Image: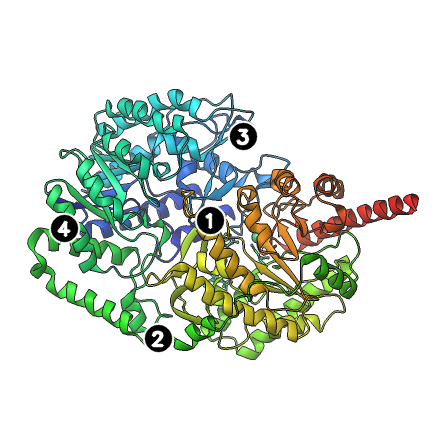
Amino acid sequence: MIKTHILGYPRIGAQRELKFALERHWRGEIGEQELEAVAAGLRARHWAEQRAAGLDYVSVGDFALYDQVVDHVLLFGCAPARFGFTGAETPLERLFTLARGVATEARDACGCGNAHGSGTHGKPALEMTKWFDTNYHYLVPEFDAATRFSLAPQRLLDQVAAARALGHPVKVTLVGPLSFLWLGKAKDGADRLGLLDALLPHYCELLARLKAAGAEWVQLDEPILGLDLPGDWSLAFERAYHLLHGAGVPLLLATYFSPLQEHLSLACKLPVAGLHVDGVRAPEELRSVADWLPPHKVLSVGIVDGRNIWRADLDACLARLRPVIDRRAGNLWLAPSCSLLHVPFTLAHDAALDAELRTWLAGAREKLNELRILKQALTDGEQSVAADLATARAALGSRRASPRVSRPDVAAALAALPSDADRRASAFAQRQAVQQARFGLPAYPTTTIGSFPQTPAIRAARAAWRRGDLADAAYDQAMRTEIAHAVQVQEALGLDVLVHGEAERNDMVEYFGEQLDGFAFSANGWVQSYGSRCVKPPVLFGDVARPAPMTVAWAAYAQGLTRRPMKGMLTGPVTILQWSFVRDDQPRALTCAQIALAIRAEVRDLESNGIGIVQIDEPALREGLPLRRAGRDAYLDWAGRAFRIAASGVADATQIHTHMCYAEFNDILPAIAALDADVITIETSRSDMELLAGFGAFAYPNEIGPGVYDIHSPRVPATRDMVRLLRKAAAVVPAERLWVNPDCGLKTRAWPETEAALRNMVAAARLLRAERAGAEARAA
Ligand SMILES: CN1c2c(nc(N)[nH]c2=O)NC[C@@H]1CNc1ccc(C(=O)N[C@@H](CCC(=O)N[C@@H](CCC(=O)N[C@@H](CCC(=O)O)C(=O)O)C(=O)O)C(=O)O)cc1
Ligand SMILES: N[C@@H](CCS)C(=O)O
Ligand SMILES: [Zn+2]
């Protein structure tokens, strides 16, 4: 029998109801009960949608108020001792303390929904990091020698009870014990795997309680089976799952994002009742899994893409499934490849997308319907869903044949690119000398990363403009006023290289997507990024071209307000690619090269309009790295080339910066150096400059601005703290190559703390400059 299910559903709400309720709660406008009522209403609605689409189970446990991983920290009672929980707190108080820090240092203490909480005082929130290769950030469990576990299952059991009361068959979703430990961070030399034996009895008890509560299945997500794992981690799976099996509830082991490869036979052998595999990212493994998995076990095939928004090619899906069915007629489940958390709720009626494009797309709801059609086609024959299949074929045909997708001029422009288009004319040392002479910057030059506070007034002006309530000219003027204010503040603070502040940008990727041909953007295609924060990834459906300059007028206006250098600010091709929903009909490398060409033209236009310094942000460079080691070199090769194509069309005297954040970079240092940016500004303060050790050891050749303060905290960093960090940096990177800047952009901050922090930062730079001048004078 064929069944359908999902690994998880988006929880933010079709109209971002959860986001708004969370932010109201944090501002003290609604209490816990009202927030819980919104959450319960969303869960009930989402289950109803799943059942209406004919899914055989609803998914329970995937709905997190903030993040599913931090929910497991609470479920297994392993909040770090540093939070000092006494048991007197409510579950929500504990959750938001872990997620946002304590009141005085809270991530989002101001209630705006921003992450503020990694300050070094008070109780900083748990660290956030990327969930595998997605743009979703989870809260990192913290383990240390004192970590103990205890089960607190009531919230989850209540949700099972609520789903059952509504008459739904329930499959509970949990992160599996090995992935949970792997995704955590060990402090004080603790051994994460060493915690497994202490954790497993609590998983067993939980499984038994879920069974007793009426859960028919429990899905245990173990996406780490798609990674290159150390041997002791792979070995631990058998031991762990033998124990879990004893709890008696059928277990579905879920893997996704990456092929199983050397873990394939292990995954097939584990004592679980079913195995889910990602048939989109690893279609080549389907047949082996179908052969290897014992026939009494359920095989769940992730057949519909959970990471992208294209309408499925149902004929291709059916063709892919047929050999599998032949092998396992009785026990086949169909599902999206991974949780639908990574796609918007629906794009079917989105007002910003044209009617033709909408037919090419599938949000979470539309993907549920695709599962329904596939199941019926396989169960009752294709004729039973002939109309649905015909509609899908027509949409696919229209996409394939559309003149909007292919642009011969773009192919020609790429083909015409000289082979050395990805190389600057001169070596760095030569460029550095020319740039020093041009800009005459002091030692330890100060700058910021680009964005200044996106205030409620800015957002409100843009919302009014989009609604048509504010005329173009008035909006333009409002943004110019913001830019002028940012310039005036920076001049008063004494920063050396200024930025215009990015007031006019809704998002650093969406803003460019809106202006480039080949992209479409939705009005409501929101995807959760972290907590209550969402992004609206543009839809990259066709060949990319730049019809007109995108940032030049704003940059030139800002430069006209000051005699100091104004940095032009662009998002790089890899990050635009990575944070968009990208076409699946050509290699990503080619799409990236097309974006690179557009950015190259923008860089040159900035240069010819008097902008001497241009920053090309690539915070997602690391995130695009394949999860498996194989394939990484090839990726770094084309990604690096795309960046260099964007950056290399300028004269020696034009200084190219890049910026990176939100990731560990030490394992890709050679690739970062190969970008050959004149200056890289990089997030380092949270690791207390540890990252720079890698840069020093590797002898990174160009200039570096290691972030000297964490922009996620409203705490104003003291000058002495930043001086200490800069001294640490100067110990590994020659001082003449060091810049002084924050970790990242300041868009989620408010002005008062921003000004105060930058004032202290400039003071730190001046202090080091004076010391250096003194030392030089003494040496002379
Ligand atoms: C650097 N980061 C980014 C990532 N991915 C991106 N695509 N962009 C990024 O910047 N990944 C890694 C990190 C993730 N960090 C963040 C940080 C902050 C946000 C965030 O603030 N998101 C906002 C939405 C931003 C946006 O698009 N704003 C629009 C419209 C906003 C909106 O909802 N407007 C309201 C009306 C508002 C009013 O009247 O005041 C509406 O339309 O209803 C804009 O500025 O115009 C968020 O609120 O979630 C995301 C990721
Ligand atoms: N220029 C961007 C980079 C963020 S990663 C900003 O300052 O917000
Ligand atoms: Zn950044």
Q: CA distance from mark 1 to mark 4?
A: 35 Å
Amino acid bearing label 4:
Arg
Location of residue 360 in the rendering, given as x and y in whole percent from the top left corner: 28, 66
Q: Indicate which disc residue 580 carries.
A: none
In this picture, residue 190 sits left or right of residue 754: left
Answer few, some or many: residues within 10 Å of disc 3's Cα (few below 14, many 20 plus, some between 14 and 19). Answer: some
Q: Name the N-terminal-most of marks 2 and 3.
A: 3
Residue labelled with disc 4: 322
Q: Name the N-terminal-most of marks 1 and 2.
A: 2
Tally the numbered discs: 4
Location of residue 124 in the rendering, given as x and y in whole percent from the top left corner: 57, 37
User: Circle 2 — which element?
Assistant: loop
Amino acid bearing label 1:
Asp
Amino acid bearing label 3:
Phe
Q: Establish if 360 lies above or below 189.
A: below
Mark 3 touches mark 4? (CB < 8 Å): no
Residue labelled with disc 1: 633
Judge depth for marks 1 and 4 and give the one in front.
1
Visible residue check, residue 579: no
In this picture, residue 222 sits left or right of residue 638: left
User: Circle 1 — which element?
Assistant: helix
Q: CA distance from mark 2 to mark 3?
A: 54 Å
Judge depth for marks 3 and 4 and give the one in front.
4
